[in-house]
Every structure is written in C-alpha cells, then in structure tokens.
Image (tube, rainbow, N blue to C red):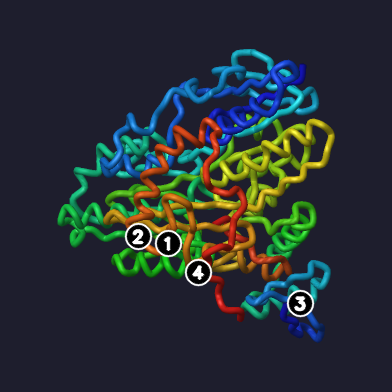
Amino acid sequence: MPVTTIAGRDIHVDDEGFLTVYDEWDDDLAKQLAANIGIDLTDAHWKAIRFLREDYRAQGETPTIRRVSTVGGIPTKDLFTLFPNKPGKKMAYVAGLPKPHGCV
Amino acid sequence: MRRLVVLGAGTAGTMVVNKLRHRLSREDWQISVVDSSDRHFYQPGYLFLPFGRYTPDQVVRPVRRYIPDGVDLVQGEVECVDPDAGEVRLTDGHRMPYDYLVIATGVEPRPDQTPGMLDPALWRRSIFDFYTYDGAVALADALPAFDGGRLVVHIVDMPIKCPVAPLEFTFLADAWLRERGLRHRVELVYATPLPGAFTKPIASARLGSMLADRDIVVEPDFLVERLDGPNLVSYDDRKIGFDLLVTVPLNMGAEYVARSGLGNELNLVPVDRSTLLSKAYPNIFALGDANDIPASKAGSVAHFSVEVFADNFVEHVRGQPMTGRFDGHANCFVESGGGKALLIDFNYDTEPLPGDYPLPGLGPFRLLEETRTNHLGKLAFRWMYWNLLLPGRPIPLPAHMSMTGKHTPHPK
C-alpha cells in the first residue's frame, strides 16, 4: 500500500490516491485533497463531505451519488456543480473514503 | 411446527424452496412461497426476444410447475412485513406468520423514477426497455420498422440486473443492423453512468475495444436527470437526442420492502455479504437481486449464493454458526453477435480475467474471448435453467469461484 505525504503528514493511499485509513483524515487534509483536484471547499461542499464521512462510518461503504441525494438530502444536480464531472469519485476522494466500487 | 415464508418465486425463491424442502423435515417445517404472478419468466431470454431469436413462449412457464410438493404456493401481493411481530401481510388481508423469512422479490425496472421517460407520446413507441417481458415483446414488434437514425442504448444508474445485458443488446443490435444492410444508416450510441464499458479494468478494456471496433460511440459518466422529448439530459447538462432509445430504467427493490422499513434508498435489503443474513434481523435473509451485496444482480449469483445459503440455513436454525461463506461468484456469458459470445467468471475479490474456464463435457470455455462455444453455452443454459437450476438439481458448476485456468495479470 503506497504512502504519500499530504499536508506534511504520511498518509496511506491506494493506486489512485484514495485514502485507505479512515482515521488519517481530518478537515485540513480535506482542504488539501480538494485543492489537488481544483476545488475550493465551501459550506455546501462540507455538508456533503460530513454526510459521506458519517454514512461510511455507519454503513462501511462509500455512499453512491443516489444515496447522498436521497438520504443525505443534497440534490444530485448540486453535487455535479460542487464536484464537477465525476461527483461520486471526487466526493469520496476529498472525504478520505475508498473509491466507490461500481457493482460490476 | 416451524414456519419458513419465502417472498418471491423467481430464480432465487424457487431454488430456495426446492433446496430447503429436501433439507427440512416435513413434520417440523411448513414452507410457503408467495408470488404475485402465476408465470415464471426466464429473464436472460428477454435479450433475444427483440431480435426474434426467441419466441415469447420459450421464456415463460407456469410458476406452479417448479414449486415442489410440500411447499404452499400463495398467489398474492405483499402489503408489508412486520419484522417485530414476525408476520407478512398480503394486500388481500391474508396474514402469514413466520419463524424465518426469505426476501427474494428481486428488483424491477422503474421508468417512473426518471422524469419524462413515461411520456405517452414516446414510451413504447420510441422509448423501450427490454428488462421486462412486456417491454421486450413490444421492442420485438417495433424493431423491424426501424430503418435509420440514432439508436441509443442507455443505463439510468447502477446497480442493474445483469450489468452485461445492455452491452449484449448493443452488440446484437449492431449485428442485426449489419445483417439487414442498415448499419451505415444508424448511429449507435452507448450511454452509461460508468466511466467506461464496464467497471472492472481488464473486462472494461476488452469490451470497450469491442464497442470501438463496431463503431459504437460510448458516452461515459452520463447520469441522466430527465428526458426532454426525444432527448436524454444529464445532470451536467449533456444532451443526447435519439430516434430509438433502448433504456434500462432505474432498478429498485419492491415497494413493500420500503414500507416495512427493511430497505436502503433503492429498497434493497442490507445483508451480510457472506451469509445473506439481514443486518437488522436474525431471522430474515435476502437472496437474489433483493439484497445489497456488491455483486452482479445476475441469475448465476442467485444460484451460487443459494447453494451456500441452503446449507447455512440448516445450521442457523439449529442455533449453530453458519460455516458457508458466499464469495460473490458470478459467471456470465456475454453475447457479442454473429453467433459468438464471451464468458466472464469473477467474484468479490477477483475481477474477470482471461484464460480458460474448465467444464467437464462441455468446456473448456474461453474467458473474455469471443467464441462459438461460448455462444452455444449461452443457448444451452435455457434448458439447464428450466430443467436443472430451478428444480435445484446438481449442476457441475462450483458455487465458489476457482482460479483454475485463469491468467492473472502481472504484478505491478
């Protein structure tokens, strides 16, 4: 498992840069991860990220876009605005969660 | 007398009652199965209906024929499950108390979940689905009149039953149009919410190049928000116009699952992925498409998981730990047109790989490669389904995936 340095700390990531250790994430790291993909975090971003973090802790799976929308209450349209092009992947990346796995 | 109630007499539910009737004594166990339909459909056959390769009568049989003696078949619609009372209520007021419950009512296509899809001017006129019997039959009637324009094959969102079927439909449509000398008049587009043809990298590359070879345009990461007349509109404002749309609507579990508080946002029942036991109730299992395991919603997954479940269930009701562990095994023929098909074999941890799939008598089949033998295997499967699989007879396909014959990728 590769280790990289983000925000001055050693962080475990997978081949695509997704964090692999839930507890290595914090708000400062999220800002850096967001910056890596050209996103400046606003309150609206944080609302999505907080939902992802909590839902993952409860369910053990990275939530899908549909779940963030229906359970997290953030319209899909907004997610595409906040995390352009690939919101499912980008949200998970910034929230320090595993890449959402498409069920084949 | 202990009572087992199975909801759904589809692929998984029918196999469950056949496997468990042998394993549970008739003196001690009453087994009932509930279904709203008196017809059992061979769903893999829907793919061939639009092209006239199967006739409707080849994919339909009476449900009752596959339910064994000693199992009560109840025709009815489930109103709700009361998991605390241990009771199923049907819409006609009938109550069915249970000690153990198996939810096997699968998923169904929900075109009503995408605004504009059921536009009466377009639905089943230029918008079709082939994941229902009625939809596949309607498309079979309409397809011969299509002689040019843009044909879009489309998936609303994952997960769906048989994730390879939209690709198969696209390959068969390409071949069908070529046979009729119409291919040059048709633009074929494959619009998918996935980043490519498939999720897993090796299969995605192989299937993606097969689409490119056939001049099929892939529109990846396309998550549809609505239809605006004969146009698909995505959340990021991309628009794809169509003359003929063959879509896979959102697949959702049954509404009673939601009413009973047993489902997630897609009405799928959260279960342990190794045992298929509900995460919320120790006497409820969800099998086949009805659960939320990260595997393909495919008949092969239903089959392999029921094999593991049947032995586990006997242990579980004796108060013993369940020793079988389902590995997410799926095994799917992928029809590619021109009388050929590929085979993919994979599980939770191993993506589809190239190589050989050994099978005494019939095989070996080539994995991730188009061959005539694979196509014949796919066709032979209909006979196996009706005669071996549903009745729960032994099939020489191991429930757990094997690495034998598979070529593993070079380590990075």
Task: Count neighbours of disc 4 (C-alpha within 10 A) and say few if under 14, some if 14 to 19, many if 20 or more.
Answer: some
Q: Is residue B298 above or below residue B387?
A: below
Question: Which mark, residue A12?
Answer: 3
Give the foreground label among 1 and 4: 1
Task: Count neighbours of disc 1 (C-alpha within 10 A) and say few if under 14, some if 14 to 19, many if 20 or more.
Answer: many
The CA span between labels 3 and 4 is: 25 Å
Q: Residue at x 63, y 76 (%)?
A: A16
- Which of the 4 image quadrants contains residue A77? bottom right
- Report x, y in % for residue B84: 80, 27
Q: Secondary structure beneath disc 2?
A: loop
Question: Which mark, residue B366?
Answer: 1
| Left or right: B45, with B339 as reference point | right
| Left or right: A47, with B230 as reference point | right
- Dots 1 and 2: beta carbons under 8 Å? yes
Q: Secondary structure beneath disc 3?
A: strand
- Which of the 4 image quadrants contains residue B238? bottom left
Q: Nearer the viewer, residue A27 or B179?
A: B179
Q: What residue is disc 4 on?
A: B202
Q: What residue is disc 2 on?
A: B371
Which comes before the other along the chain, label 1 or label 2? 1
The chain ID associated with circle 1 is B
The chain ID associated with circle 3 is A
